[in-house]
Image: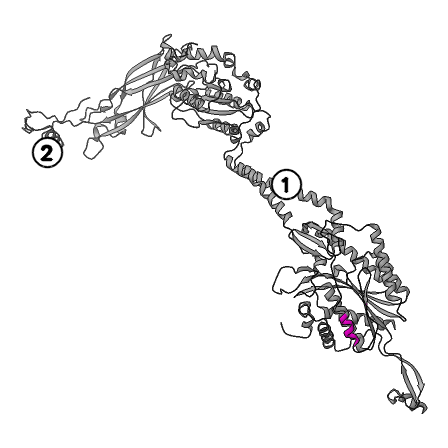
Amino acid sequence: MPNDGDGAGDTMPARDWFAICHSSLVLRHSLDIPSLGIRHSFRTHPTFMTTSAQVSGFFTTPGFAAAGAAAVSIPIVIHLLTRMRRRPVQWGAMKFLVEAFRRHRTRLQLEQWILLLVRCLVLLILGLALAGPLLGGCASTMGIDATGRTLYLVMDDALSERAIGADSKDRFERQRQLAIRLIDSLGSADQVALFTTSRPNEGVVDPPTIDRAAVRRTIEGLEPKHGRSDLVGALRDVRASLVEKGQPADRAFVVLLSDFSKGSLPVDQALPEQATKLDQLARVLAVKPMASLPNVQISKFQPRRHMILTGGLGDGGPVRIPIDLELQRFADDTPTRATSIELALVTDDLSKPLAVFPKQEVRWNEGEAKATLRADLIVNPETLDALNLGPGNLSVGKSSGATVVLRARIEPDALLEDNERFAVVELRQRLRVGIISETSSSGCHPRRTSARSSWWTFTRSASTRISLRHSTRR
Amino acid sequence: MPTTTTNYLDPRTLAAVASLELRSRMIVEGMMTGMHRSPYFGYSVEFAQHRQYAPGDDIRHLDWKVFGRNDKLYLKQYQKETNLDLVLMVDVSGSMAFGTDLGNKKSQSPPTPVGGSPGAPGSWRKYDWSATVAATLAHMALKQQDRVSVVLFADELRATTRSGNARDHWRTIVDALGSAKVDPIENDTSLTSASPEEVKARATRLTRLFDQVTSPLRQRSLLVLISDMFVEPAALEHGLARAHHRRHDMVVLQVLDHAELTFPFRSPSEFLGLEGEGRLPLDPPALREAYLEAINAHLDAVKEMTRKFGFDYLLVDTSENLGPTLSHFLARRAAIIDKKK
């Protein structure tokens, strides 16, 4: 196999690795997950051996189950002791007692046995209940379906999984349904582990458990994150779990659930050897990669200068905010020709726009994946007045600066989360700058021989002897 | 508790008194004091006829009213004072050894059953109750110059006393009652049941017993049968029929312990029959209802049987006060006899 780790093959591109998975392992299955037939496949290798580990896997606290089983002997011992240590009573009206006994002998004996049975069952059930039974494992105890396979689900819950398809459902929902279908198709003794690719991991079920209902609930509660996938980290965790469990490779299945669309996983990077050798520990399956949805992402949006001086000396002109914006386009075969960008100045709480700038448009060439926009946003005096940054607000005691939020937004597409981006810029009326030099006309300068600390002390002191010149720079 | 005469009739008090003679005297005195009248049996002094006076006759019996009308001396003659023989038939079978330990008055728990331990302090067996009642009735009858005899029986006749009305005859009766052996027949084996032949033989023995008791009686007598009546109703019927055929009057006192009437046991026990029935390990609460059903059916059968022959019947719980129970019964009987006259 190409990924056996010899020589230069220590690492290999993830794209190739996926190809290996598809070709050498379960290509047929991975291409059509709805008809995966995992359950049928599992049933072709039945085993009815139940190990103690399997039994202990049926309970969250197996000790209570053992205690309950042991406690069954208590009523039996009490029963035997009671029979041995009955109080002797000399009885005169024995004739009637015997008559009643003979008439109800069968019922009395039956009641005795039922009572003993009920007492034993009460203790047993109490013990089992306290042990927290995982009911799915009961069937395997009785040898009904003791296959004992382990399914490792690796779910991609990165940002790309939030992409909404034509059926108005996000991609993660599809992965979720697939995962649940896989779990529901498992045998009663099969175990499930769950890993997610985003970091930090949440809702991961490891080590594998037979409590499929709990895993199902965990999956139902999962939501895709806003970050990137860390497939390597997830596979490393899966490998560690596989090694710890030590199950034969034909009994362990790793199923990767991801859309594998462009941008979802770092498929262009090399995977470490540990990840590429995963198929030596388990059979690895992957869902068929989904077609990339037409999506444009604002990958970068920032002002070229983070502080803008509005000029407080009374010229009253507009203020320019230079910005850089970068767009990234996925699914290059899609017919997206141009992207319209809406830029606005919004309040700190992002609730309402203070100023809306003219729309910008980026036109895409064929095969182009990235586009850059450089523009100057013009803030008119009315907006500055609204921010108390106009010429009339140049008085002592009033605010001389404000932090405003710039918003860039494009039209809704498959992934809504990357259609809007914000940047912060500080607007100030003026900036007071003190220039200290050795040849200052005021003659106030530290001696040449002074240490660096003297410079710091000098600049921090509010000396009235320093004469400052006001200047405005735009 | 205030010390009154009737308090002496409490079974707990009587159980503490070892002497049967003393027990009986206490009962008689208690009843006399409590009722203010003598508890006659209904065969009190009755006028028979007039006879002409002859020298030497006791002038106390002269009928002065006749003398006033006719100027002739006539004596009033009365029916013989002792006109009825009293035969006390006391059961001394093994089941009569069953009783209750009444020694612990403070205990709230049911009385502890005892069996086969005669004379144990505080124990109050059915036979103790029966002997005390027999001695009491004998005492009262002898005070009226009635002839009294005692018959002790189990499956067969065990002992008898002669019939007499002498003053010291009561001591004879008390000695006979006191020296009777009430030995339970213990059988350590598992439960045994009586065969039909055995049941038939018991009936035959009981009929023969009644024949043995009634055949020596020359005149109409009052038979008082004091027993727990743990016999087949059919056998009892044969015996009662014999007594009825010979025109004897009969009183049946069925003596049962309170535990036998209520079956108060709760903890698992092993019951040992006192008449050789064997052992029966049992969880009493499970069988209580069936037992009570069986014994109540038997009590109804015995009661029906005695009423069928016109005899008096009294079911006695040995835990109840003996005096009031007995005096109430005798008063009721006296009233019935008066009504018949």
Query: Which residue is nearer to you in this view: A467 or B92?
Result: B92
Query: Which residue is nearer to you in this view: A305 or B275?
Result: B275
Where is residue A75 shown, x and y percent of the image?
60, 44
Quarter placement of the N terminus of chain A = top left
The quadrant where residue A389 appears: top left
Is tag 1's residue or tag 2's residue first in the polypeptide sequence? 1
Q: Which chain does the numbered disc 2 sit on?
A: A
**Would residue A407 appear left or right of A3 to someone viewing this image?**
left
Where is residue A230 shown, x and y percent of the image?
38, 20
Q: Which chain does the numbered disc 1 sit on?
A: A
What's under tag 1, amino acid-wise? Answer: Leu
Task: Name the outermost residue toward the bottom.
Answer: B71
Which residue occupies 94% across, 90% down? Answer: B72
Q: Rate crowding at label 2 as few (under 14), some (14 to 19) or many (20 or more) other CA atoms within 10 Å.
A: few
Residue at label 1? A117
Magenta highlight on residue B153: no
Task: Name the outermost residue toward the top.
Answer: A366
Query: Which residue is nearer to you in this view: A469 or A369?
Result: A369
Chain part drawn in magenta: B160-175
Colour setup of the view: one colour
Secondary structure of residue under mark 2: loop
Q: Rate crowding at label 1 as few (under 14), some (14 to 19) or many (20 or more) other CA atoms within 10 Å.
A: some
Residue at label 2? A463
Vertical comparison of B138 with A374: above or below = below
The quadrant where residue B67 appears: bottom right
What's under tag 2, amino acid-wise? Answer: Ser
